[in-house]
Image: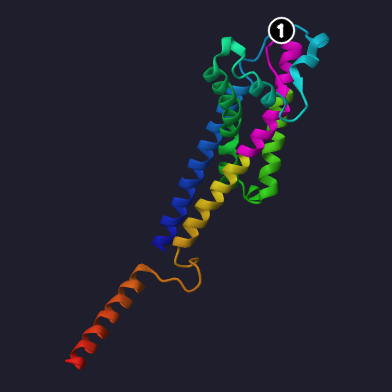
Amino acid sequence: MELDIIKKYKLIFYGRVYYFFSVSYIYMVVSVTIFPFPIGFTSNLEDGYRSINLIPLKSIVFNSRQIGTAYAGDVLFMISILIKNVGGNILLFMPLGFLAPLVWSKFRQFKNSMAAGFIGSISIELLQLLEYLFGGMDRITDIDDVIFNVIGCMIGFFIYKMILRVVDTGSPLKRPKGSLTIEEIGELKGSCEKLEDVCVFICE
């Protein structure tokens, strides 16, 4: 009975920790991608198409071709831009792929987690487009951001699966069939040593 109560409180504690990190993550994503939210109604409808890229990897290819020519030939600076663009978008959604399955059971399926990453990324890009069109903010709606956001969510989901597999493998109830615990290995080693002593005694 006492063990059941301790287990219950542990589950409650871990659940609150997961929710805390999830809320903190959502706040971080919103603050990085949406805020500062513009106040006003400065319309940029006439040149809104300039802030939209619907061709996959177009911006990545364009920036790659600028290495060695743009910014007075500063190669390291252009490479850093590429790394920030690609790596930043991947890292931004990795926690989503990891935390969502921990907090909500329906996201423990791969397709549901990927759908959450895709819808979340699309929503951010649409909000950034609205900020550009009606708020005068210098925002860009890029399909490449969506692609790398989803890749980041996928990586986070795989990390969740790997950690879950390691935890389950370490459990005596869910370890692979035929595997031995540390205690069983120790007993087997002791039996082998005793058998070796008997063999040596007989041979002598």
Residue 90, compared with residue 4, is above or below; it is above
Outermost right residue: 46
State the residue at coordinates (62%, 14%): 69
Q: Residue beneath label 1, please?
A: 40
- Residue 27 relative to residue 135: left or right: left
State the residue at coordinates (69%, 26%): 61
Q: Quadrant of the C terminus?
A: bottom left
The stretch of residues the image draws in magenta is 127-152
Residue 58: percent from left, percent from top: 73, 26
- Residue 75 relative to residue 130: left or right: left
* Mark 1, other Cα within 10 Å: few <14 / some 14–19 / many ≥20: few
State the residue at coordinates (80%, 10%): 47
29 part of magenta stretch: no
- Residue 190 relative to residue 160: left or right: left
144 part of magenta stretch: yes
SS at badge 1 = loop
Residue 25, compared with residue 204, is above or below; it is above
- Residue 170 relative to residue 199: left or right: right
Residue 37, compared with residue 143, is above or below; it is above
In the image shown, does 116 or 92 lie closer to the viewer?
A: 92
Residue 14: percent from left, percent from top: 47, 46
**In which quarter of the view is residue 83 placed?**
top right
Colour convention: rainbow
Outermost left residue: 204
Residue 111: percent from left, percent from top: 70, 48
Residue 89, compared with residue 38, is above or below; it is below
Q: Quadrant of the N terminus?
A: bottom left
Query: At label 1, which amino acid type do we have?
Result: Gly
Q: Main secondary structure of the magenta part?
A: helix
State the residue at coordinates (36%, 74%): 184
In the image shown, does 196 or 149 lie closer to the viewer?
A: 196
